[in-house]
Image: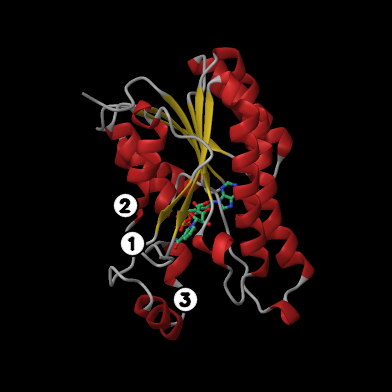
Amino acid sequence: SMRLEGKVCMITGAASGIGKAASLLFVQEGAIVAACDVSETSLNTLVEEAKDLPGKVEPYVLDVTNREQVKEVVESIVQKYGRIDVLVNNAGITRDALLVRMKEEDWDAVINVNLKGVFNVTQAVVPHMIKQRSGSIINVSSVVGVYGNPGQTNYAASKAGVIGMTKTWAKELAGRNIRVNAVAPGFIETPMTEKLPDKAREAALSRIPLGRFGKPEEVAQVYLFLASDESSYITGQVIGVDGGLVI
Ligand code: NAD
């Protein structure tokens, strides 16, 4: 049987990389996926690719930094489908620079999307989960949020912040039967990492015990586990998906 049959799952950053792999996996498992992304053209491609799968992909153009738009999209999902069972806060960006060269606008952009965006969407969704007395929230952090990485002051701060929010919300919302967990991917082959210089890729590869980069589908499988009832006694955790990078 399908693992997310009839579940309404809102995924941000749903049109590329890990979010796209998750959207396709979730519809394969029977979910109704509210696929949210800033890129309308990528969303159209996703809808096309998902059209013969068992569940349904409903596209929403959404910038997670826009609180008004977030409220509107959440309201229209709830109006159409009656509930939101699963929220995956997957949207994220990088604007890398060494500390001494990092521009204020690069700090602000990354914090706004990766940290405040997660706050914006979760704050709009949780009242509905409280009403329905259930929910699973999956926040996407990174190994960088736990261990740091030269050149990623803004990104590391945002992803460490996501872990802090995850643990706080797990405690605040457990009494409402809402679980909140984080996933910390290592180096995954997506558009986000393909622009990295060869030297950086080789250096990363040499530190990964499994000897290869991860695939978006391998992270999506962990989102699926956390979204499904199979993880019903797990909350407040940060699950690494990194080929052993941080052992
Ligand atoms: P990606 O760039 O392939 O996809 C990110 C998606 O988010 C894109 O479709 C983009 O349009 C969308 N997006 C960007 N800004 C947005 C906004 N303001 N509102 C809504 N959508 C927005 O990236 P990915 O590699 O698939 O990353 C997905 C998540 O995984 C991110 O949170 C990223 O930080 C995290 N992560 C990735 C890696 C990796 O190695 N790729 C490692 C650790 C963590």
Q: Residue at left 27%, top 34%? A: 28
**79 on left or right of 3:** right
Where the C terminus falls, by quadrant? bottom left
Q: Position of residue 149 (x, y in %)?
A: 57, 72
Give me the disc on residue 196: 3
According to the image, label 1 marks what residue? 214
- Which element type, helix, strand or loop, lies under badge 2? helix
Q: Residue furthest bottom?
A: 199
Vertical placement of 200 versus 114: above or below?
Answer: below
- Residue depicted at 67% across the width and 65% down the height: 154
The residue carrying mark 2 is 218
Q: Is mark 1 within 8 Å of ligand 1?
A: yes
Residue at (45%, 68%) from the top-left corner? 193
Mark 3 or mark 2: name the one nearer the start of the chain.
3
Neighbourhood count class around disc 2 (C-alpha, 10 Å): few under 14, some 14–19, many 20 upward: some
Q: How many marks?
A: 3
Residue 179 in the image, given as x and y percentages of width and height: 51, 30
Label 1–label 2 contact, CB within 8 A: yes
Q: CA distance from mark 3 to mark 2?
A: 20 Å
Q: How far apart, in angstroms, are the residues tagged by discs 1 and 2?
A: 7 Å
* Amino acid type indicated by mark 2: Glu
Looking at the rendered image, the disc whose residue lies closer to the viewer, 3 or 2, is 2
Position of 56 with respect to 62 (left or right) is left
x, y percent for residue 72: 66, 27
Q: Tell me which numbered mark, 3 or 1, is placed earlier along the sequence.
A: 3
Type of the residue with mark 3: Leu
Identify the amino acid type marked 1.
Gly
Q: Quadrant of residue 78?
A: top right
